[in-house]
Amino acid sequence: MSAGRFFQLSLMSFPAALLLAAPVHAGVIEREPPPAELWLFVIGIAALSWVMACRRWWLPLAVWLPTALFVASLVADFADPVIGPAVREELGLAYVLQADLAGALMLVVPLMFANIQFSRKY
């Protein structure tokens, strides 16, 4: 390969190298789960808790711990002094309220089914 050809290829690849080296500014939208996914989680956790409660009254409590950790990480993002305002700016206050409601339901439903089955048995 001649020096001129190498120089020509390096000049042509320079914009691609700059594009690859540029920092990526991803928004908050990519980080947070969409509202439809949150409501599917609520429906899935409710269905799983109901099925588990029909088997043993304490089984929905096994779903509660991972759910509580997920909801805590979701709410921690809203309470963060940097991420919280960015979420409210990009996704709006309606998303925050919807995520809080979905999170509250995800926490309450397994406990509710466990309590219903426990009160029926004892």
Image (spheres, rainbow, N blue to C red):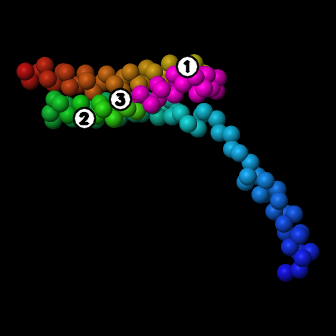
Q: Which residue is mark 2?
A: 62
Residue 39 badge: none
Q: Secondary structure at mark 3?
A: helix
Q: Left or right: where does residue 89 sit relative to residue 43?
A: right
Residue 91 seen from this side:
no
> Which callout, 1 or 2, points at the residue further toward the start of the chain?
2
CA separation in Å, label 1 and label 3:
22 Å
Identify the residue at image location x=84%, y=66%.
10
* The magenta segment: 71-90
Q: Amino acid at mark 3?
A: Ala
Check the picture and name the quadrant holding the C terminus: top left
Residue 68 badge: 3
Question: 10 Å neighbourhood of mark 2: few (<14), some, or many (≥20)?
Answer: few
Chief secondary structure of the magenta portion = helix
Q: Nearer the viewer, residue 102 or 11?
A: 11
Q: Which residue is mark 1?
A: 94
Identify the residue at image location x=16%, y=24%.
117
Question: 10 Å neighbourhood of mark 1: few (<14), some, or many (≥20)?
Answer: few
Cβ atoms under marks 2 and 3 closer than 8 Å:
no
